Amino acid sequence: MITFNESIKKAIPHLLKLQSDDGHFEGELSSNTFPTCAYTLVQLALDQPIDDDLVRWFAESQNGAGFWGLDAAGGSDNGATLLAKLALMEINKSLGSKDVEPILKKIPDLKLNQWIVKALYARAGYISWDELNAPKILSSVMQMGEKLAPILPKSLVSRFKPPNNYAPPVRLFYTPVFENLFIAEKQTLAPFFILIAIHNKNRREVVSDLIKWHLGSRCKDGSWFRVGLITAVSVLAFIEAKNAGYDSSEVESAIREGHEWLQGLRSSDGGCREARNLNVWDTTLSMIALSNIDTKEYKPQLDRAVVWIVENQNDDGGWAFSGMPGGNLPSDADDTSLAILALLRSGIGKDHDSVKKGVDWLKKHQPANGGWGTYRPGAGDVSCISITSHAISALLEFGGANTEIDRAIKWIKSSISDDGYWKDLWLAKNTYGTALAIETLIKTGQGECDEVKRGAKWLESCQNPDGGWGEDINGSRIKSTIEQTAWSTYALLLNDPENQSAKKGIEYLVSHQNPDGSWDASCVGIYWEVIGGYIDPNNPYVFALTALNLASKLLVNRINFLG
């Protein structure tokens, strides 16, 4: 017989295990195919050992049809499979490993199509660099678009992208199109441009410009954007540059420090994570969940987390997804919003300097349409439901930002789909966007609006027969997950404490808690299309505890839903 409070009490120790001595919370993210393959290519390029655990990861991650998926959710992805094939062929060529041959034999014949994968095949000498180039007529159209870019709206320019099977031309680096790309896209393109420029016309001034720009975009820990694929390809590009005569002490340092950072991406399963940590996200959500339950009881843990959050605020007043004080990892609206909310919920006053600076950053970075994007307007960014919702929650908690909140609410209402859901960018997918939109509209006094009714109806319609919710990063329904069930249940409970779908959601959360009080994490975090998603062990606790805590407050305490 399990009650709300018993379920919460059993789960909290598992969340607290994720808190480090310095106060931050962090779970080990799951391995992904692209960063694991890119890391393998770096190891081989530097004549570093390929250990048995890495080869075992390739074997165990290959599915019965011979494919690899993008992420821990499994599936079959052609690009991921072809990149895994390249990494294994290179291992076999260098080491002649008997363990690799059986894996290679299972891989089906696939056509190279994705230009990023084609570029890495070209680097290894399996295809010509010319195969990355777009046909002349398409190249001419692209060049015309580049010329028009200065007179077009930035929002339109940021969406200008070539077909996925052809590499963007290196000349793009000198255009407004490149300048207005999303920051991660720029840092992904630059090392590929270096490789392409070296192996094509090898114009020294172009290669030198690219090298200078990309060296300047490094984080102080030696990574690029603290992301595995970007950092690994960057190290490969600088190795090629060094071999082509573009050697310097800075290039040497970039190779050495980048490789050292990549070593820390190894996961316990032998593969590589795409990012080393999302510790600001993990810490702020953990603080909010604990403070919702009992601020006094968890004061020691909250106090330590508060110190860490304050110390990891960027100089501009915002927070990045990963703590690096004084570094050049850019602040983003999601982590800034959550940090403000976490500090205020943990007992920090509104007059605290970190809070005021964070609120100022948030207000300054609200786009004209009212909906916050991840980074800044005009940087290849688009407004996002979850980020806007978190920003509104932070400003509501702080108070005195009615103008900004009203504009954001108007944007949220206008962003609902015809089917009644909101699509999100960063977590899977429509359930997350819809749940947060409903929550935000209710908390801002809009609970009776048509959008909330439509959103609640949509959530109810996509509940699985077992009482949970689940969808993949493309929005297709899958088996239920703790995370998606938790945030969907929370929204429906907030809207109507008597909601039957919410009651079934609570039943799912309680009945799927492991005997020791833990919950199994699922792949609900999202990167972009060549990476897929990730599992974060922190997520099931912060979301499930939040939903169960609301249930215990709204409904009669200690009701046993399991009968």
Image (cartoon, rainbow, N blue to C red):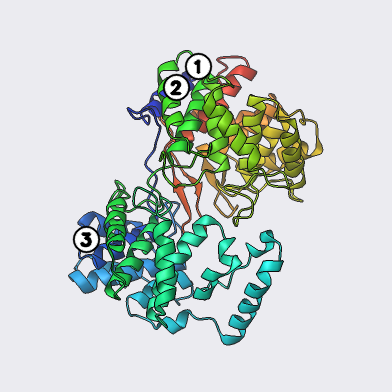
**Helix, strand or loop for disc 1:** loop
Label 2, residues with CA under 10 Å away: few <14, some 14-19, many ≥20: many
Quadrant location, the C terminus: top right
Q: Amino acid at mark 2?
A: Leu
Q: As rendered, which of 419 and 257 lies closer to the eye?
A: 257
| Picture residue at 34% right of the left edge, 28% below the top | 22
**Which marked residue is nearer to the observer: mark 3 or mark 1?**
1
Pinpoint residue 51: horizontal percent, then vertical percent. Answer: 20, 57
**Residue for badge 2:** 302
**Residue for badge 3:** 50
| Picture residue at 27% right of the left edge, 73% below the top | 243
**Helix, strand or loop for disc 2:** helix
**439 vs 236: above or below:** above
Proximity of marks 2 and 1: CB atoms separated by less than 8 Å: yes
The span from disc 2 to disc 3 (Cα, nearest Å) is 42 Å
Pinpoint residue 387: horizontal percent, then vertical percent. Answer: 61, 41
* The disc label shown at residue 295, or none: 1
* The disc label shown at residue 499, or none: none
